[in-house]
Amino acid sequence: MRSSAERLFLVILFLLVFLMAARMPIDTDMWWHLRAGEATWQGGSPLLADPFSFTHPGEEWVNHSWLGQVLLYGAFRVLGYWGVSLLVALAAACSLTLLFLRGVSPAPFRAFLIIFGGIAMSPVWSPRPQVFSLLFLAITIIVLEIYQERGWRRMWLLPLLFMLWSNIHAGYSLGLIYLGCVVFGETLDQLLLGRERKAGSWAQILRLCGWTTICGLVVLFNPNGINVWLVQFNTVGVGALQQFVVEWASPDFHDLMQQPFLWILLLTIFSLGMSVVRPEGKLVVAVIIFAGLALMARRHIGPFVIVVLPALERYGWPLARTFWERLEEIRAFKKMPSLKDRESTLSQPETMRGAKVINLLIVSLLAASAIIKLYIVAFPAYVNTTLKEYFPVDAVEILLESPLGGNLLNEYNWGGYLIWHSRNTPVFIDGRTDLYGDETIGEWADLIQAQGDWSKQLERYKINFVLLKPERLLAAHLGENGWRQLYADEQAVLFARR
C-alpha cells in the first residue's frame, strides 16, 4: 500500500463488503451441496454417481464442485450456519478488496467503485461453490495484469490456480473466457488500431496463448476427467433453465435489486466512450463479452462486475478528475477553501493524532458490526424460523414420521432441502439441472400440472409421496383419486398413496 490512508481504506472497505455479504445461509441448492460435501468427507472420495434421486439412481453425475462442497460442509461442520455465512462473506470481501489493491486511482474513488460493484453483485453472494469462482476470477485478472505490466516470471502459478478452480467449481470457464478476451483484445490492438506497442508484444501474445492452452488442459486433473469440459455445454444446453431456474433468466430491471447492474453497465459504457485515452482492446472485449453473459443470465452479474471494475477504475477516474479540477477552479474563483487548504489544516500534529483515534474507533465499530451481524443472521434459531418461509419444514416433519416408504414427487426448489433433511426419501428432482436434463424436467412439469396420463406416471416411478405447492393442478386431482392428504398449509400440501 502506498500510504497509511490507503491501508485505512482497505480495512474499512473489507469490513463494509463483509457486512454486505454476511447474510442468512438460505439457498435452494445449498442443501444438496452440503449433503454431497458430507458424503465426500465421510467417504474419502468425491461423489461421481447420483445417490439422491430415484429418476437417475446411480447414473454418472459430473460433480464439478466436489471440493467446494467439502469447503462448505467443513465450515458447516465446525461452526454450523455461522461457518457457512463466514465463508461466503470472506470470499466476497476478498474478491473485491483484491481489485482495490491493484488500482492506481485515489483510494476514495476506488473504494466508491468497490462499494458500488458490491451492491450490484450482492444478489449472487449465495452459500454455494460459485461464490469461490468470483474470487478466482479476480485473482486471474490481477495475475494477468502483473504479467503484462512487468513480464512476471511466475505465470506457472496460473495453471495451478485453474487446476484448483476446476475442482472447486466449473466457473473456471469464466477464467478461460477472460483469457480469451485478453488475447483477442491484444491482437486487435496490434492489427487494427495501430497503437504503438513495446517491442516483443507479439511474443507476449503468443506466450499468453500458450498459457491459456495450458490452463485449459490442466482442468482435466479432476475426478470427472474430460466431463469437466463437457458439463458447461450440458448445463447451458438445458432448455428449461430459464423457465424454472431464476438465476438463469435475464435480469429484470423492474426489480430494484437488479437495477445496480444496469447502472454500472451504463456507467462503464459512458466511461469508455468519453475516455480521454483510447481504451485497451482487452478491456473493451471483456466488457462486451461479460455484459452479454450477464444480460442473458443474472447469475453472471457477479463475474461481470469483477471484470468491469478495473475498466471503470482506469477510464472513469480521468473523467472524475477532470470534473474535480473544474470544481476546484470554481471554488478558487469564489474564494472557497480548497482541498489543499483543508489538507494542510488536517496535517497538523494535533489533528493527525485525533484522526488516528477516530480512525481506530471507526474500524472498531465496523468490525464489531460485522461480527454482530454475522452472529444474528446465522443464529440457528433465527435461521430455522426463517426456513419455514421458503421450505415446507412442517410438511417434511410429517413425512419423516410416516411409516410408509417410497419415492417422492417434489417441487424443484425443494429438492435440495429434502436431500439434506429427509435423507431416506429419494427425490424426483433438485437443482442439478445438468444431471436431469430437459427430459426429466419436462416430465416433472407435466406431472405437477396433471398433464397426460399422470396416474400411470406416478405408478411407473413408484411414487408413494407427493409434496407440492397447493396451487399445483396435480394437488387438486390427487385428493379426488384416492390419495390421502397428510398435511396442508398455505405453502405446501403432502399426499401419500393409500
Image (cartoon, rainbow, N blue to C red):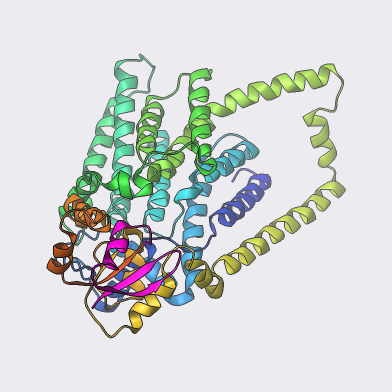
Quadrant holding the C terminus = bottom left
- What x and y, as percent, mark residue 190? 32, 20
Seen in the image, is 168 located left or right of residue 437? right
Question: From the viewer's perspective, is 441 left or right of 331?
Answer: left
Residue 374 in the figure: left or right of residue 421:
right
Q: Indicate the position of residue 170 as horizontal and vertical percent values.
A: 28, 52
Decide whether residue 479 is among the magenta residues: yes
Point out the stretch of residues depicted in magenta.
469-498
Asked if one can make out residue 220 in the rendered structure from this viewpoint, the answer is no
Residue 131 vs residue 249, the one in the foreground: 249
Work out whether residue 439 or residue 490 is closer to the camera in this orientation and state it. 490
Q: Looking at the image, which is closer to me, 466 or 89?
A: 466
Q: Nearer the viewer, residue 324 or 255?
A: 255
Q: Position of residue 206 (x, y in %)?
A: 24, 32
Q: Residue at x 83, y 31 (%)?
A: 341
The residue sitting at 63% across, 40% down in the picture is 107
Count numbered badges in the picture: 0
Can you say whether 323 is above or below 384 in the image?
Answer: above
Q: Is residue 342 visible?
A: yes
Q: Which residue is at a point 15% across and 53% down the rendered structure image?
A: 226
Horizontal arrangement in the rendering, residue 341 relative to residue 300 (left or right): right
Q: Is the residue 325 above or below the residue 468 in the image? A: above
Q: Residue furthest bottom?
A: 403
Q: Position of residue 43 (x, y in %)?
A: 24, 77
Which residue is the extreme one toward the front? 480
Residue 362 occupies which quadrant of the picture?
A: bottom right
Residue 465 within the segment the image draws in magenta? no
